[in-house]
Image (tube, helix red, strand yellow):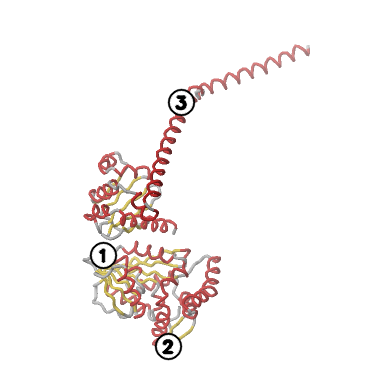
Amino acid sequence: MLTTLACAAIENALNLLLDKEPSLKLALDQVKHQTFAVEIRDWHTTYALTFTGRQFMLFNNYQEQAECKISAHLETLPELKDPSVMTQLIRQDKLDLEGDLHLAQAYSGAFAKLDIDWAEHLSAYIGDAPAQLIVEKGQQTKACLSHSATTFVGTFTQLMQDELKVAIHPLELQQFKQHTRAIKQHAAQLEQRIEQLLNR
Amino acid sequence: MKESQHNTTDFGYKTVDREAKASMVADVFHSVAAKYDIMNDLMSFGIHRLWKRQAIACAGVRKGHRVLDLAGGTGDLTAKFSQLVGDTGQVILGDINNSMLKVGRDKLRDLGLVSNIEYVQMNAEALPFPDNSVDVITIAFGLRNVTDKDAALRSMYRILKPGGRLLVLEFSKTDNEALSKLYDFYSFNILPNMGKLVANDSESYRYLAESIRMHPDQETLKGMMENAGFEQATYQNMTGGIVALHRGFKY
C-alpha cells in the first residue's frame, strides 16, 4: 500500500508538471494511450506509465501487456535521459527492451527536453522578486553541493591512494606472522635450554 | 451469508423479504448520496482511493474498450476509465440508485469528462446489455448490496466478451485477530457516530458495517465466481484482508 501511495504522489506530481509545461503534452501527443512499463530489477516490480492525452496514470505492480517494456537496474535509469544511449545499453546487457523502442525514446526525449522555469511558476504564488531570489539561492546551493561532493570524492580517493601506499600487502602480513611464530618458537626453545642448564 | 430459500435474505444483520431488500438498500444510498465521497474519505482515511487504484491497475483497460463500472456510485473508477478508453471507447456508469447516479454525473461533468460516458440505472441481477458486449466489468463496494449475488455474477458473465474480465472490489474478512478486533470496534462504535455527525444518519452506516460482516469471505466469493463460469478466478487481499480484489476471466 505504501508503494501505491508513493505512485499516487508521483502521478500527482507528473500531472502538475503537465499543467505547468504544455510542451510535455505536445511531445507525448504521438504516444498517448500507449503504456510504457519499467521493470526495476532491484525491486522485482514493474511500474506502468500511460499518457491519456489529459493526464498521466502511473501504476505499480503492473502485470498487463504494455506497448513498450524496459527492464533495468536502478543505477541504469538515469542514463535513459539520453535517448541515443539506449541501443548501447541494450548491447551492454544493462537494459532489456520489449516492444516499441520509439515509445521509450519518446518518453525519454520528452522528459530530457524539459526546461522548467521554476521562477516563473513560483512567482504566481509569492511574487517575482522572492521567486527569483529563491531560485537563484537554490541554484547556488545546488552548485555548492555539487562542488563539495566533487571535492569530497577527490579528497577521499587521494586519501585511499595514500593509505594504499602505506598499508602492507596481505602476503607481507602472512610473512610477518610466520617470522613472529618462528621467533616465538626459538625463544621457547632457548627458555627450555636455560632452565636445563640452571637445573644441572 | 445465508440466502434463504424462503424468499428472505439478509439486510445487514436483519432478515427481510427478498423483494424488500432492493428498496431498503436504495433508501440507504438515497440517504448517503450527497455526503458519499466525503464519508468515504473520512471512514477509510482516504485509503479507498488506493484500493481503487489497485483495481484500475488490474483492470487492464485499453483504448477502445467498452467498460461497465457497475454500482459505480459517484464515478471514481469511471473518471479514470474514461481517460484510458479514449474517444473510441465507452464507459457505462451503472447503478441501481438514481441519487448516486446523479451525484456521479455531476461530479464527472465538473471534471470535464462527458464525451464517452453513459449513465444507466440498472439492476446487476439483470444487466440490460446483449451477450458478449463488454470488455471489462468492475463492481467496487457494490456486490454486497445485491440481493441475489449469484444471479448478478451470471449476468456479468453473460455480457462479458470472450477474453473479458470481471473485477470485484469489496470488503472482506481479515484473518489477523488483533486487526479484526480493532476493525470491529471501529465499525460498530466509531463509524455510526461518524455517520451521525457528518451525514446525520447513523443507521445507514450501521447497515454498512453489518452488510460487510454478512458478505461472503474471499474463498466463498471466488467459488461463486467460478460457479458463474469465470475462469482463472483469483483474489488479492489489501490492508490485511479488510478489502479483497477478486478477478475472473471469461474465455
Q: Quadrant of residue A87?
A: top left
Label 3 SS? helix
Label placed on residue A64: none
Tally the marks: 3
**Inter-mark Cα distance, 2 to 1:** 40 Å
**Do the residues under discs 1 and 3 have CB atoms within 8 angstroms?**
no
Position of B188 with respect to A99 (left or right) is: right
Label 1: chain? B
Q: Position of residue B205 (x, y in %)?
A: 48, 77
Foreground residue, A81 or B207?
A: A81
Is residue B34 at least partly visible in the picture? yes
Residue type highlighted by circle 3 = Gln
Residue type highlighted by circle 2 = Asp
- Say few, some or many: other residues with alpha carbon within 10 Å of mark 3 (under 14 / 14 to 19 / 20 or more): few
Q: Quadrant of residue A152?
A: top left
- Of badges 3 and 2, the one in the foreground is 3
- Of badges 2 and 1, the one in the foreground is 1
Q: Position of residue B149 (x, y in %)?
A: 38, 78
Image height of A13 relative to A147, above or below: below
Position of A29 with respect to A183 (left or right) is: left
Residue at image mark 2: B17
Residue at image mark 3: A161
Image quadrant containing the C terminus of chain A:
top right
Label placed on residue B85: 1
